[in-house]
Amino acid sequence: MKAEPAPRSVGPLRRGAPWFVAALLLASIGLPAVGGAFGHIASMPEVGYARPLAAAPLVVNMTDQPRFTPAYLTVAAGNNSTFDLRNVGAYNHTFTVLRQPDVVLNTSWSPGELDAYLQQNGTLANVSVAGGASANVSIEFNASTAFDSFEFVSVVPYQFQAGMYGFINVSSTAPGLVTYDNTTDSYSFVPDVLVANSTHYPFNLDVLVTNTGALGHTFTLAAQSNYTLSPANFTQYFQAHPPLVSVNVPSGAGSTVWANFTVAGPGIYQYICEVSGHFANGMTGNLYVGIAPPPAAPAPSTAVVQGWILVGSGVLLGIGITLAAMTAYMGRFPPSEEEGAHH
């Protein structure tokens, strides 16, 4: 009688192959899920809303960092402005306002050099506030100070040198609104959408532009509403239609300049940077006057695949798991004729 052949052993690769197939099928669902989990939502532009100049006292916090918060204040010319000084730290600080406008002090000065300058040139205010205490001070900014800037410092030794200073920026005397914008070295305005709503026309709009980087820029506003500028046409356009306002933003972080102009009527006014190459790299924004800007676009879907693909992947995954389980029990998928035959 012919001897029956010994059963053939099943190699580890053959046993593992179905599980590998099942793993691939599982990835067909896993990867879309992971792709959705790490999807990016597009960032929306910030919006700067113009407002009337505040008549209430301006609150200035004095900290032990040492810093003034906020460090940039805006007041209207031709008015008495009141500052509510609040020392939120433990150390003594001063609120010392330079008498001379448009002066930026050198932070490398010693305390003695700073004191000598103030004694020689005078101050508009010099108030000392103990830790945890508060004080009020009023300063008159007459019409002649319109669009000037006054630096304020703490004269406690080495606090100014450590960064405790700020600026009072004086707006115009004309009734109107004020808002803010910033320039960056990434060739952008932040925000790049400004909104100014007024009950009457024309009105005065004051925009305080602050440089947050090292490069110089311009804030140049088209005179006509609802006209789209481009890097190819803006030079010729401004030759035919002078800008409503065009100011140079000085280089250096913290530099400021006022862009002051009269708005004749509602519409969308585009502003750009005229420095060579900046507009071409995307440095532009829009001023919406009397109309609301369009709503922010909805966030893009983070789904990588459509629903029907996920359903199909689920079916394939079920088949793969079933086959893998059968293989684990029978030893091979599918069994060969040799392995399945009996003699």
Image (cartoon, rainbow, N blue to C red):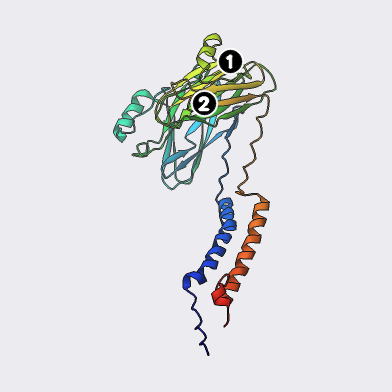
Q: Residue furthest bottom?
A: 1
Residue 76 drawn above or below residue 311: above
> Would you name the residue on which mark 1 appears?
223
Please give the residue where the numbered disc 2 appears in the rendered image: 208
Q: Which of 116 and 341 is in front in this view?
A: 341
Q: Tell me the distance, in whole angstroms, between the alpha carbons under discs 2 and 1.
A: 19 Å
Determine crowd level at label 2: few under 14, some 14-19, many 20+ residues with C-alpha closer than 10 A: many
Q: Which amino acid does the dot numbered 2 rest on?
A: Leu
Badge 1 density bin: few <14, some 14–19, many ≥20, Cα 10 Å: some
Q: Would residue 102 be seen by someone viewing this image from the given angle?
A: yes
Q: In which quarter of the image is the C terminus?
A: bottom right
Query: Which percent across, then down, holds residue 9?
Result: 48, 78
Residue 331 visible in the picture: no
The image position of residue 71, as x and y in percent, is 47, 35
- Residue at image x 52%, y 22%? 272
Q: What element carries label 2?
A: strand
* x and y, in percent, of residue 335 in the image: 57, 72
Comparing marks 2 and 1, which lies closer to the viewer? 1
